[in-house]
Image (cartoon, rainbow, N blue to C red):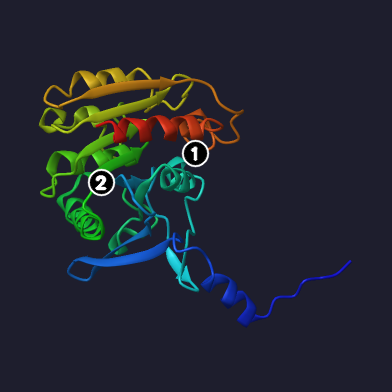
Amino acid sequence: MKLLCLTFPVVLQMLLSLPAIAAELISLETRDGVEQKFIWIKPDAAKASVILFAGGKGTLGLSSAFAMPSINRGMKNFLVRTRNLFVKNGFQVAVVDAPSDRQSSTGMLGGFRGSSDHIEDIDHVIQFLRAQEDIPVWLIGTSRGTESAANVAINSTEQPDGLVLTSSISVENSKGTAITEMDLNKITIPTLIVANTDDKCLVTPAHGADKIASMLGQARLVKVKKFSGGDKPTSRPCKAMSYHGFIGIEKNVVGYIARFIKSN
């Protein structure tokens, strides 16, 4: 048996020969002394741009090695692990990290996702994406990330073009603000709410999707889509590798979201 030993120059050449669609790590100064990092992937002829908001603390610990992004936390999150599915469906993708001033142990928990500082950070990301391609920009959040996506949809001065909420926080809790506590009547853009009927997470019940939809009285279009089942969970109910994170049905879920965005 032959062992393949790759020297550093060979590895570097392999990295440099990767397709042009390879991801990049972007860092923007969004506030005084604050950097907002995100993974940027731009396919040819993108139909729309999507900003993906992971759940939990929102801290991905993004860094770069050999000009390629490295995800140090949260790799299993539904939207983080499916980012390339969105690319394959024809979208320019930005996977956002918590900003540099929220990289502590609590991350974006405790109210930051609903803050004006968060809006300012993400508005810079929207500006960046629109500078690359003059196409619609959609916000997509999952779990605690729905708090971010909804806040931006309500308060952004950049006027995003659409909103997708998956496994939405619809039950009041101490770690942030439930979507149902927000002024959803201010949202006017098309909104898709996705849930899994088998989601056992106590703060993201599937029936919460209907409650959120009922509060979106001014949105141009509101759609609720409920999936069921998936592969056997390998994590706790509120974690990524469970029905809460659409384990085993990722392609179906992303495919449905992609069709909704393209048709609106």
Q: Where is residue 161 in the image (x, y as percent from the top left)?
A: 19, 40
> Residue 181 falls in which quadrant of the image?
top left
Disc 2 marks a residue whose amino acid type is Arg
Q: Is residue 3 left or right of residue 51?
A: right
The residue beneath circle 2 is 113
Whether residue 159 is visible to the viewer of this picture, yes or no, is yes
Q: Position of residue 242 (x, y in %)?
A: 53, 32
Q: Which of marks 2 and 1 is nearer the N terminus?
A: 2
Disc 1 marks a residue whose amino acid type is Ala
Q: Residue at x 22, y 45 (%)?
A: 136
Q: How many numbered discs, if any? A: 2
Assess disc 2: are there few (<14), some (14-19) or many (≥20) residues with their C-alpha within 10 Å of its C-alpha: many
Quadrant of the frame with the N terminus? bottom right
Considering the numbered disc 2 on the image, is that residue within a helix, a strand or a loop?
helix
Q: Is residue 218 left or right of residue 254?
A: left
Q: Which residue lies furthest to the right in this view?
A: 1
Taking 113 as reference, is 72 above or below it?
below
Q: Residue furthest front?
A: 45
Considering the numbered disc 1 on the image, is that residue within a helix, a strand or a loop?
loop
> How far apart are labels 2 and 1 at the CA level?
19 Å
Q: Residue at x 13, y 49 (%)?
A: 158
Q: Residue 240 carries which label?
A: 1
> Could you say which is closer to the camera, residue 97 or residue 83?
83
Taking 106 as reference, is 222 above or below it?
above
Taking 197 as reference, is 89 above or below it?
below
> Could you say which is closer to the camera, residue 44 or residue 232?
44
Assess disc 1: are there few (<14), some (14-19) or many (≥20) residues with their C-alpha within 10 Å of its C-alpha: many
Q: Which residue is drawn at 26% across and 60% down?
A: 132
Q: Residue 4 carries which label?
A: none
Q: Position of residue 52 (x, y in %)?
A: 35, 46
Q: Are marks 2 and 1 in contact (CB under 8 Å)?
A: no
Q: Position of residue 9 (x, y in %)?
A: 61, 82
